[in-house]
Image (cartoon, rainbow, N blue to C red):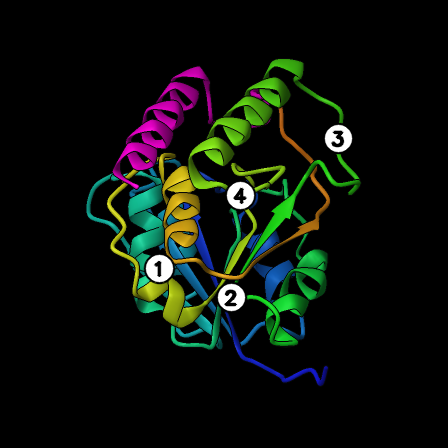
Amino acid sequence: METTRMTLSVVIPVYNEKATILEILDMVLARPEVDEVVLVDDFSTDGTREVLRSLEGRDRVVLLFHPRNRGKGAALRTGFAAATKDVVLIQDADMEYDPGDYPSLLAPIHNGRADVVFGSRFLGGTHRVLYFWHYLANRFLTLLSNMFTGLNLTDMEVCYKVFRREVIQEMDLVCDRFGIEPELTAKVAKRKCRIFEVPVSYYGRTYDEGKKIGWRDGLSALYWIVRFGIAR
C-alpha cells in the first residue's frame, strides 16, 4: 500500500520538568516527521514556565500556559484543541520515551491502515529495568481495560498514543488527571477506531529522578476504567 506523507503535531503536557524540557524539545524538533510542537505548561512552579517563555517565537513551537494546575488530562485537552496538523502524537516532557520511535508509531496511520496507534513497553522494545509493582499494576489495569473495551492491548497506560486529528478533536474528553489514559482507550474503542500497537523503547525514571505517578493514580485509573466501562 502506498505511503502518504501526513503532517504531525506533537502535544507535550508539561509540569515541573525544568531539568528535561529543553532536551526533549530539541529531540522532538530534530525529528523530520514533526511539523508542530504544542507545549502546554500546567502551572509549573520549578522555573519551567520561565524556560518555556524564553522560547516565544521559535519556529514550529506553540506555547500554552494554564493559569492554575489542572492535571495531565486537562493539559492534553488544551493541546489537542490547539493542534493543526493531520496527525496528533502525545509526548511526555521527561526523558522516558524516545522520539526515535516516531517512524514506527506513525507508519500504520501513514499507510492508511489505522486511525489510532498505541505504543507498548511490553512488546520487546528496549526498556530500563525498574519497579516490579508498577509493571504489575500496568498489566492489571490494561487487562481490566481490555475486559471492558473488548480490545487486546498490552499497554493501556503508555504515553505514546497517536491519532488522526479528526478522531481526537471530535472526542468529548472529561478527565483532568491521569484518568485520561483509560478514557482515551475507552473512547477510541467505543468509536470502533482501527487501532494498532507497536513496540517502543522505555527509559523509566526513579522517584529520585522526578517520577510523579504513584499508587493514588493507579486507584484513579481503576475508577475511570470501571466508570467508562459501565457507561459503554
Q: Residues under labels 1 and 2: Cα distance?
A: 19 Å
Q: In this view, does 97 lie to the left or right of 199?
A: left
Residue 127 placed where, x, y %? 75, 35
Question: Mark 2–mark 4 contact, CB under 8 Å?
Answer: no
Residue at the image point whose x is 61% and y is 18% from the top: 136
Q: How far apart are marks 2 and 4 (CA)?
A: 15 Å
Q: What stretch is highlighted in magenta?
A: 207-232
In the picture of the structure, the residue carrying the numbered disc 1 is 79
Residue 8 — which label? none
Identified at 73% across, 44% down, the residue is 201
Question: Along the line of sight, which residue is nearer the eye, 227 or 18?
Answer: 227
User: In the depicted view, which residue is nearer to us: 148 or 158?
Assistant: 148
SS at badge 1: helix
Q: Would you call the spot at circle 3 few (<14 residues within 10 Å), some (14-19), or many (20 or more)?
A: few
Mark 2: which secondary structure?
loop
Q: Mark 3 points at which residue?
A: 128
**Label 3: element kind:** loop
The quadrant of the image that shows the C terminus is top left
Horizontal placement of 6 versus 1: left or right? left
Residue where numbered disc 4 is placed: 151
Q: How crowded is mark 1: few (under 14 residues within 10 Å), some or many (20 or more)?
A: many
Q: Name the residue under label 2.
A: 115
User: Which amino acid type corresponds to the residue marked 4 in the rendered image?
Assistant: Leu
Q: Which of marks 2 and 4 is nearer the N terminus?
A: 2
